[in-house]
Image (cartoon, rainbow, N blue to C red):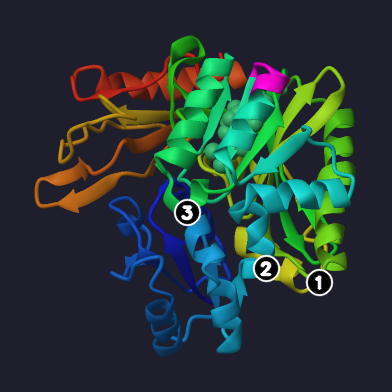
Amino acid sequence: MKILVVGRGGREHSVIMHLEKSEKVSEIYAAPGNGGIEQHATCVDIDEMDIQGLIKFAKETEIDLTIVGPENPLNAGIADEFEKENLKIFAPRKNAAILEGSKDFAKQFMMRHEIPTASYETFTDPEAAKAYIEKQGAPIVIKADGLAEGKGVTVALTVDEALEAINEMMVEKSFAEAGQTIVIEEFLDGREFSLIAFVHENNVFPMLAARDHKRAYDNDQGPNTGGMGSFAPVPDITPDILEFTTREVLQKAADGLMKDGRPFTGILYAGLMQTKEGTKVIEFNTRFGDPETQVVLPLLENDLLQVIVDVMDNKDPQLKWKDEACVGVVLASKGYPGEYKKDVLIPTKEMNNDTFVVQAGTKKTDKGIVSNGGRVLLVGATGETLAKAAEKAYAYLTVYDETDDFFYRSDISR
Ligand SMILES: Nc1ncnc2c1ncn2[C@@H]1O[C@H](COP(=O)(O)OP(=O)(O)O)[C@@H](O)[C@H]1O
Ligand SMILES: [Mg+2]
């Protein structure tokens, strides 16, 4: 099969590295890809949001299956447009991708289908939102309704912080349209994890639980980022919790979408909080998580393409997982998530078989692979235990200690 992967991040690099191992794959194309993806696939210079350009390419190249990484094209209706042209695509339609694209939709959906989540109210008027915050007190969580590149949520520890977030989102309009409607929700205290599943209509096949680290610096200090590292599986997430989450969250979501006339095909990601009262949903994503994908896929024993084909054919892919652990540590440009330098040559060294590098913000140039983003790459390793996996990843990461241009957290999974 000829496969097209849409996206340019670490998640897409990881998906491609695993597709490459498939016996069913003849060729892989990426649009637009990145410096690392170029080593495994043919990169074509088409933007993720250029849906008509992607369709034209898929037809001309006789692509058999398209896999979509990022949320923006999903919410722009890439699956609907591909289906109209009879092109096979493993991705949810616009009317199901809205589960990620609108936090207010997701909250109403969870209430309607009795999926456990934080209590909430939705507002379009800043004064009403502020009055609600004064009444509720802090801590409290403010979320822009629309897609905001992972920057639309404020976990406010004080009422002042919460009011400031309302001003930024609704009055100063820092997220434009995406922040004109906001969700204010109950603060959930507990341990976060994510559970990602392959889904087709009512069929749900969960992967292993993973946990990511969102803060920039060690001990969860510093600003929020797109994710500084992740690991899988998660020792404190027991089989009982996983069984509950599969049944009460993922299965109910898939069934609920069917009932609502929004059948889902693709990857459904549940972001969860394990609280004293049980498991609660923080959010749904309708695609592979980043950087969770990078640590979950290396533990999958199955042929990834076969899994996707089976799921789309209503067959049980019989997922098998290695009895190992995987740890991934992000290398970021110094200054990220604020200002940072680009075009810095990235040092490399030999690595052993259990270690891998997934590239995110990179670019291939004549002098070698250079940085081209805040999160540059992820160094991952598998091992018998999390501790052993972490040890291997960190052994490789010392190669970056010699430079002043990059940083990484030293406590991922530790
Ligand atoms: N109700 C909540 N209680 C506590 N923390 C929350 C809550 N909602 C979100 N968060 C924190 O904020 C992060 C981002 O929120 P999320 O809803 O996942 O938005 P997005 O990923 O779209 O930015 C979560 O990963 C979690 O750490
Ligand atoms: Mg999230």
Query: Which residue type does callout 2 highlight?
Result: Asn
Q: Which comes sooner in the sequence, label 3 or label 1?
A: 3
Would residue 152 appear left or right of 404 to someone viewing this image? right
Provide the residue span drawn in magenta: 134-139
Q: Earlier in the sequence, mark 2 or mark 3?
A: 2
Q: Would the CB of label 3 be found within 8 Å of ligand 1? A: no
| Residue 238, label in figure | none
188 above or below 307? above
Q: Residue 298 at what x, y percent from top left? A: 57, 42
What residue did someone put label 2 on?
95
Q: CA distance from mark 2 to mark 3?
A: 19 Å
* Vertical side of 116 occupied by 390: above or below: above
Q: Is residue 126 left or right of residue 176?
A: right
Q: Nearer the viewer, mark 3 or mark 1?
A: 3
> For mark 1, what is the residue?
261
Badge 2 vs badge 3, beta-carbon distance below 8 Å = no
- For the question of whether residue 199 can be seen, the reply is yes
Q: Which residue is mark 3?
A: 177
* Residue 192 x/y as whole percent: 67, 26
Q: Does the segment drawn in magenta span residue 144?
A: no
Q: Residues within 10 Å of mark 2 (few under 14, many from 20)?
A: some
Q: Amino acid at mark 1?
A: Gly
